[in-house]
Amino acid sequence: MYSSELYNLHNAIKELSSLSQELIEPLLVKYDLTSVQYHALQLIVLKESIAVKNVSNHLKIKPAAGTALIDRLERKNLIERVHSEDDRRVVYIKSTATGRETYHSINKCFANIFQDFYSVLNEEETQRLKQIVGKLTEHVSSRIENNL
């Protein structure tokens, strides 16, 4: 494949990603969440308990931005801060019942959105796409890690 064809393929993938974001953005707005807030909530719900610094590290944002993000989620009653019993300086984040309900409700809606999104693919195409995306993600991730 020529480099111009690969560039066009890359742009098509970016466009598809942008379109999928347009599908889910109104849902997040309905729940008064940004994409980053949703990803933080997802991380916190799935981990059950996580240190504040690990939220920032996982989302690849600065600690100050992580603190502001946690503050917003706490004001929305989606998460709560809990001090470590061993070291009061260490603060863990846990989801509240409201946070877990919100996360699961959003995920049900996402399931419907993506069921429709991928409905044009048959099972074999879906599996092949999953393999290809996984292979590309692994390759690019290793390139990024090797350049650091």
Image: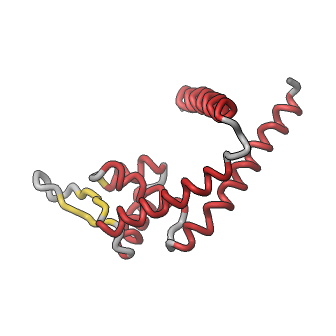
Residue 88 in percent (x, y) is at: 15, 58
Circle count: 0
- Between residues 121 and 24, which one lies in front from this camera angle? 121
Q: Is residue 145 left or right of residue 121?
A: left
Residue sitting at x 68%, y 51%: 117
Can the viewer see residue 140 in this picture? no
Q: Is residue 79 left or right of residue 126?
A: left
Residue sitting at x 39%, y 75%: 76
Q: Is residue 121 left or right of residue 97?
A: right
Quadrant of the rendered image containing residue 112: bottom right
Quadrant of the rendered image containing residue 147: top right
Residue sitting at x 57%, y 72%: 29
Please state, as top left, top right, bottom left or bottom right, where the N terminus lies in the image.
Answer: top right
- Between residues 65 and 50, which one lies in front from this camera angle? 50
Residue sitting at x 73%, y 44%: 120
Query: In the rendered image of this protein, does residue 96 appear above or below residue 123?
Result: below
Q: Please say which color scheme the image uses.
A: secondary structure
Residue 104 in percent (x, y) is at: 42, 59
Can the viewer see residue 115 in this picture? yes
In this view, which residue lies farthest toward the top? 1
Residue 85 in percent (x, y) is at: 11, 55
Q: Is residue 73 left or right of residue 140?
A: left
Query: In the rendered image of this protein, does residue 6 appear above or below residue 105?
Result: above
